[in-house]
Image (cartoon, rainbow, N blue to C red):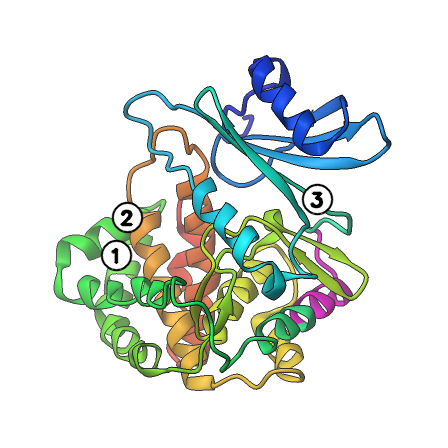
Amino acid sequence: MQEAREDKPVWSAVPPGVKAEAEAVLGARVTRAVRAFGGYGPSATFVLTLDDGQRAFFKGVYPLPEGSGVRWRNDEEERVYRELGHLIEPWAPVFYGSLRTEGWHVLLIEAVAGQRVPPWTASLARRAVRSYAHFHAATVDTTLPGWLPREHHLEFTGFWAAFTSDTSLRDRLAAMCATPAAARQAADWLGAHGPALAAAEAPLTATRRFALLHFDTRSDNIRIDGELLRIFDWPFACAGPPEFDFAAFAQSIALEGGPAPDLTTEWYSELLALDLDVLAASVAGISGFFADRGSLPDLPGLPRLRSFQRSQLRSSLAWAARIMDLPPPSWLDRLVD
């Protein structure tokens, strides 16, 4: 069965006026536009080849039909490129400019070079997390702009407390299992260990060692160029504990067949020390978030999102159980795709 994917526009569907303004911003004519897939939304994304031999990346959003589950975030991302360029270089792509016309909002940025992942190798993962540590170390405990959100990581807390207190939520999560036996195992495991997971989140709410976070670092948002991790898609940039950003990235590497989080933690820590209590709290919080989101119905226009969130639940909750010395949640292997 062919995997569902977002219905991204083709280049011929982009209005001529939008194309003309993009060429004006770039100062060159577009000779080729290759549709770029990745992410989980139907934005109009293309790698452009220009008549001066250069390349650029076109990220456009446009009016959506009523009832779409998609929320565009180009406004937030453009602000990051314009106001935080000195903090996100050289990890972020170069920002060339933007345009707004005919209901479209387009960002034009560098077409980032480098190695795509997966597949992950130990070498690629080591270079990626070490460069990520450099990114966080550049701003840790520094004064960051006041407009940056400082509570995004807290939005990932409280889910295990809800699962613990509400049997209907536990039943909803257990219902993701492919067999009744696995569902019973899930319900029993959650009933026994949900309180410990909820309690483990406490250090995440107390820490004040903040850095600039990307907050969405995963394989379809990165390239690895030598020793440098290139990161794009910046609408969720915020201030928060580096442990949270690292935890989310490390579990995503593991779920894609890369090195286990225990090893990537060691590599990252060689350059920036991690508070292990805050790291454990982050992993627990992330796993609770994906338990909640992965057990919700699909959203219109985002056909792969819930499946991906269930994959992240498998990775993050297995890691949380190891960190906390809980029995392995073997029922995760029976989650539906």
What residue is pinned by disc 3?
Answer: 110
In which quadrant is the N terminus drawn? top right
Relative image position of residue 290 (x, y in whole percent): 37, 55
Task: Write down the residue under mark 1.
Answer: 184
Q: Nearer the viewer, mark 2 or mark 3?
A: 3
Left or right: where 264 falls relative to 53: left
In the image, residue 317 sits, relative to residue 308, either above or below, namely below
Q: Is residue 162 visible?
A: yes
Q: How many marks?
A: 3
Q: Which residue shows up at 45% across the image and 70% down it?
A: 244
Question: Does 71 lie within the magenta span?
Answer: no
Element type where label 3 sits in the image: loop
Q: Are marks 2 and 1 in contact (CB under 8 Å)?
A: yes
Q: CA distance from mark 2 to mark 3?
A: 50 Å
Marks 2 & 3, CB-CB < 8 Å contact: no
Q: Nearer the viewer, residue 80 or 197?
A: 80
Query: Could you say whether the residue bearing mark 2 is in a helix, strand or loop?
Result: helix
Image disc number at residue 322: none
Query: How far separated are the C-alphas under marks 3 and 1?
Result: 50 Å
Seen at 78% across and 51% down, the residue is 114
The residue carrying pointer 2 sits among few (fewer than 14), some (14 to 19) or many (20 or more) residues within 10 Å by Cα, namely few
| Image: 128 above or below 211 | above
Q: For label 1, count other residues whose C-alpha is less than 10 Å away and answer few (under 14), some (14-19) or many (20+).
A: some
The magenta-colored residue range is: 119-129
Viewer-side label of 3, 1: 3
Give the residue number, with chain letter if any, for mark 2. 180
Q: Amino acid at mark 1?
A: Arg
